[in-house]
Image (tube, rainbow, N blue to C red):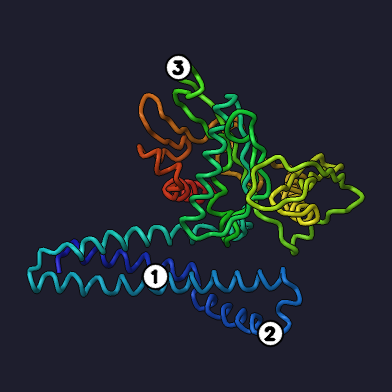
Amino acid sequence: MAVGVSEELRSLLSSMASIEAALDLDKARADIAGLQEQAAAPSLWDDPEAAQRITKKLAHLRAEVRKTEALRSRIDDLAVLFELAEETDDPDTRAETELASVRKALDELEVRTLLSGEYDDREALVSIRAGAGGVDASHFADRLGRMYLRWAERHGYPTEVYETSYAEVAGIESTTFAVKAPYAYGMLSTEQGTHRLVHVSPFDSQGRPSVCSASVEVLPVAEKSDHVACDESELRVDVYRFAGVSCFSVTPDSTVRITHVPTGIVVTCDNERTQARNKARAVEVLRTKLLHHRHQAERGDMRVLDDDGDSSRSDDEPIRSYALFPGEAVEDFRTGHETGDLGAVLDGDIDGFLEAGIRRRRSAR
């Protein structure tokens, strides 16, 4: 086997060992055994919320262990592939292709070990709002929302849209949705901030280049263990007519808006068929926002949950540019990561940006 290949394989094995130690597979297997016992209990579904947490965590741990074990097996098999290629003097590039594939999979798994923040293992609540730029901003906000939903779909992560406020001409004013997968918050948290689009507006008859923006907020979903209370006496509940587009049968006055009077936090939910279910979902979203508010108050740090390690960057300063003029390009101003395939990015291919952001944040910490 060539010296260069041997060194590469040793490097992969070393990285794999470090990842396995960080993930603590023995503990993960023990946790799986414990969760399997809980899942088998006859009374499991007496508490549906707890049952969903148990089954979801069990499925995630199983998938994580299987993924890690499969990658270890692929690395072990690489040596055999290269030896066979040398013995037969086979010009087939399968070994080189597999080496590149394994290296990429290893890098992706390594990112998972960097998600060790207090809330990184939580599900994510994502809110997107149109910023400056009128109709263009509304259209851009809609495209960003679809980008994150497509990213979740690519990875098989369930999502639930809680609210969408449509703009008068095109696009949306705002949308809020959850990515219901473990570590979704850790993966998406570095996306928080202002995103900017540079393009020639289709709404400008003179074809002049313009700039618009949209803001992205990412919060960890609150859990029972957070003890975030929503006192009914502190809530103002408004019900109004559904104004969106839905394939479901909704009641005429099903949209619910809840205002938490002490903090002024407002949440809306319009995706459910009934007023009662929309209210329940709105309370879930409110608890998540109150968790964020509580940490802001306790620590006096407006970026306690979304800090990217750069305290010099203002909240309204763009973190990423999506350019359609003069040429296609997407560039992250914090990490320097960029690509010329704007179409792929808007179709959810954002893992490169997420990984670069996570590595940068870990380095800053």
Q: Which of pointers 3 and 1 indicates the residue nearer the eye?
A: 3
Q: Amino acid at mark 1?
A: Ala
Q: Residue under label 3, please give it.
A: 208
Which element carries disc 1, helix, strand or loop? helix
| Residue in the picture at 92% in, 50% down | 233
Mark 1 or mark 2, which is nearer the start of the sequence?
Answer: 1
Residues packed near mark 3 inside 10 Å, few (<14), some (14 to 19) or many (20 plus): few
Which mark, by number, is residue 41? 2
Is 2 situated left or right of 280 in this image? Answer: left
Q: CA distance from mark 2 to mark 3?
A: 65 Å
**Res 333 seen here:** yes
The quadrant in which residue 172 appears is: top right
**Res 312 seen here:** no
Where the N terminus falls, by quadrant?
Answer: bottom left
Q: CA distance from mark 2 to mark 1?
A: 35 Å
Looking at the image, residue 34 lies above or below residue 315: below
Q: Picture coordinates of residue 286 (x, y %)? A: 76, 50
Mark 3 or mark 2, which is nearer the start of the sequence?
Answer: 2
Residues packed near mark 1 inside 10 Å, few (<14), some (14 to 19) or many (20 plus): few
Q: Picture coordinates of residue 310 (x, y %)? A: 55, 39
